[in-house]
Amino acid sequence: MAKIKKKGQSGQAKNYITRTQAVKKLQISLPDFRKLCIWKGIYPREPRSRKKVSKSATASTTFYYTKDIQYLQHEPLLQKFREQKVLEKKISRALGRGDVSDAARLERNAGRPDQTGKPRYTLHHVIRERYPTFIDAIRDLDDCLSMLFLFANLPSTTSVPAKMIARCERLCHEFQHYLITSHSLRKSFLSIKGIYYQANIQGEDVLWLVPYKFNQRVVGDIDFRIMGTFVEFYMTLLGFVNYRLYSSIGLKYPPKFDQTKDDKGAELAALTLEGVNLATNEETTKAITNGEGHGPDPKVQAEVDKLVKKLRTESAADKADEEMADGEEEEEEKATDAIDKFEPAAPGGDVLPQPTYSGNNPSKLFANCTLFLSRETPRQSLEFILRAFGCKRIGWDPILGEGSFTTDESDPSITHQIVDRPIVQAATTEQGDGEDNQTAQKLGPNQRYPGRIYVQPQWVWDCINDEELKSPELYAPGASLPPHLSPFVKPTQGQYDPTVPLEEQETEGEALDAAIEDAKDEVESDEENSEADNDMDVADDNDNDEEEDSDAEEDEEVEDEEDEDEDEEEVLQRQRELEAEISGKAVKSKQVDPKLKAKLEKKKALERKKKEEAEDLERAKGMLSKKKRKLFEQMQYTNKKKSTEDMKLRSKRRKLEKEKAAGKA
Amino acid sequence: MPVLKAPSGNIDAPSQYKQPSRKGKKAWRKNVDVTDITKGLDQLNTQKIIGGVIAEKDSADLFVLDVKGDASITKKFPKIKKGLKSDEILAARSAVPAVPMRKRPAHDKTTDGVLPVKRQRKEYVSGKELSRLKRVADGQHDSTVDIVDAAFDPWADEPQPEPEKAVELAFLPEKEKPKKPKTLEQQSISLSANGKPIPAVYVPKGGASYNPDFTEYRERLIEESEKAVEAEKKRLAELEAERIKLEAAARSAAEAEAAEARADLSEWEDDSAWEGFESAGEELNVKAKRPRRKTQAERNRIKRRKEEERRQKHEAAMKAKNAQAERIKQIALEVAEKERQLALEKAEFSDAEEIGDDEKLRRKQFGRYRLPEKDLELVLPDELQDSLRLLKPEGNLLKDRYRSMLVRGKMEARRKIPYKRLAKTKITEKWTYKDFQLPA
């Protein structure tokens, strides 16, 4: 006979433990338990049958694995929690006695670990335990970065102390510096929620979301104690990740932090990276963040500026001419820089990867640009992105904080300016007469510095996502921008993609259909043209269309005309028949264009081929098991649904393009 | 050196203690006779007050050797009139100086010119600090974790140095390290309806762009608006159901009332006959049916009719049954078709998504509270701007992050409890009117 099992001694009843039981077992308070679970990565579990686990369990009871909790008992943090509890007890006892100074002393001593010799605890060992390898840590970086960037942008409150925010901010800036120096930022996307960034760190894609500045409402229904626990953990994690990343590219961690610069809003520029020479263990300071190191001597620059100003006042017209020439040169350069595109040799061949504009090196995308950010643009994100894509010289309005390459908008070295203000309609404000320096330097609402390109911020994002400098005309201030597409959505095979020309994405059958239709139209119009030659009264088909487009009033008339048209055709046909009868020849069938014929045949062949393929599939399907067959059917169903939608979109576009072409011709 | 000495102590002959026994109540401290000691102490005090303990004084202070009498004294000192006893008592002053009321002696005005160091009030704790201390004692301290700059690489592959064991301790068994359970490696339970893991950050779709492509935006708008319409419909349906329920309740109540009223009324009518009022028509209605035997013909007729009825009933039932059987076949076909369709759609849904959906959640969640709803993140068509400057960001990232943690099953949902639950106060009337007194 099998051994009799007692109820509640094995199986689910043993494997799971309720939260209350766990808290009692560990002898800590519930908030401490929550903290510990978050740090150690112990999550609530769902037993298959609650009734079997515990008779008294209600729907809201939370369960954990007993083994997890058992393992927690060895946690060194537990001791720290207990020590904290002891301290709390001491303080409350002192307060109860009315001995406030004693309570204060106890609390003070606990906060000064260097003097009491009792160190506060860190989460270092937990990091190693939860992420056995560095790659594991990077895989979990999405959440970590989103959280820390969010907290770096929060206003400080009692629940979110300013110290924590400053720490988050610094860690984030350090991380951004790594991305800038290693050029590992890949994509970015402006969404309605915030700005998404994607970076590739050691082969792993990391995606995170950064909120827009000054936008965070702190709502009441969020438990900041729990969020704070997560943030504490993630701060430790990002610190280590930064350390590893910095040392992997030969930089010293932590980078030098300049408090005064940070107070003035320098953000990224408040940190100075230092290289560490491994051989001699000597530290070599490199000014990586700013272009100043690469630029000319500031004194010389100042003199040059003065000279330029002088020149400008002397001969403004000359200078304008020069700059115009410069601009032309630039354009010429661009024209020569264009690279041939690879096209498939045979129709229906594989889509070849196209070479990118800047010679496969997105890290040097903006290397030759000097940008200036107007004061209405989001500086933080723009600065980060531009630097990550090789821009060394970024200037901005002094209102946006310190650390810029130049704050002078009239700097002649600026090649691009990013503006996001509307074109003021009420223009023609009078120029300042040059006496007042400040007004002389400022420009009127619609005035521009010649020789530089003005673009809207979206240009930067679209450039980096497509890894090429997009043509700035589309993004000129005041122009209606092209849609900002998500760079993360990869177009699948055969899916409609608005950015790709129609020829590249349409299927063979569709192309043929379209061609046949075109040919038919042509034939018809030819016929009608010949008819028009015969009979001057009949309006041309094309004319008809144009009239329809241009004049809505004449619609009725046009319809009448069309009716007449058809009548004419019938009459003509009859006439032909009569003629044939008289002459004794067979009725001339409609002239068929040889091209059209060939295409029709091709289409037929294609259809035949398709049919054959379908049959083959059908046969193959017969071989499959029932389950697999069903799955296959499902797949086909969805594919068909999607492809019809895509076809519709493409046909729509074809129509539009044709109309456009007709309009042009 | 005092010549004379006042007799001190007990001058009686040595004797036994007055306390004859150490047993019983008499041995209790309070019962021990200490009158002579107290008397002595009183005496001492009075002596001090008067001017010092006599026994300790020098004899020169106490006594003067009068060599020759003074005749003038009698003149100098007129006969002292004896004053009142009360005046004497009131005028009496103690030789012991009074306790000074000043903090510092008044005469100590001169200084050495150096200002005394101001005493630091180390003990002082401000009210703010006190309230903080109280909070700390209550367990609400700010973070105790030390976040320091990372100074080492936790993932560096340093060789683990094996601690060399002393030879003489080799016999000791090695201390076993706690083994990490396999359950710790398991991923958290995703709360999405399809059970697939939910990513920390969703890859944004094109429709979420600040300047979206039209088709993508329209798709998203339609999707969201359909959802809103669905929710509104549900709400309205609930309202309607509630209304119908209330109406039905009201109707049934009214009916019950009406029935009651009718019952009352009928009683009246019954009474009317009793009371002698009778309407004219009433006697016509009464048709007394005379009991008589059914004839055979009648019986046969009834029998036939019953038979016919039974047959008809049976036929109708059979017909219905046949129709139902037909219908069943049809329904089965329909159901099969529908199921196939559903399965296809479902498969499409699940096939397309490797990742979980954080809007359609599973029924069973962790903890007592429901998860917060996801914010609607959509810019309405009339608010859609193509300038980044004019963009009004949608949604709340803080909430979004919090919800993401919950949805990924990292913890159970919690709700902020702004106040501690207080004990309910119960207000009662004082029954003073019961505290009457009987007239005497």
Image (tube, rainbow, N blue to C red):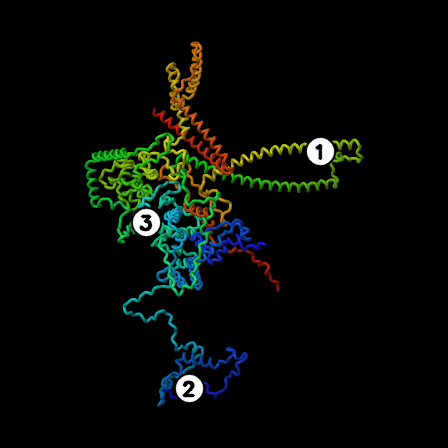
Q: Residues within 10 Å of mark 3 (few under 14, many from 20)?
A: few
Chain to which mark 3 belongs: A
Numbered mark located on residue A248 in the image = 3
Question: How far across and down, in percent of the image, does residue B164 sit?
Answer: 37, 61
Quadrant of the rendered image containing residue B328:
top right
**Distance from Cα at disc 2 to Cα at disc 3:** 102 Å
The answer to whether one can see residue A411 in this image is: yes
- In which quadrant of the rendered view does residue B46 lie? bottom left
Please say if A228 is above or below B322: below
Q: Position of residue A187 (x, y in %)?
A: 35, 41
Q: Viewed as shown, does residue A413 lie left or right of B387? A: left
Q: Judge by depth and name the residue closer to the eye, A331 or B210.
A: A331
For disc 1, the marked residue is B310
Q: Chain of mark 1?
A: B
Dot 1 amino acid type: Arg
Q: Earlier in the sequence, mark 1 or mark 2?
A: 2
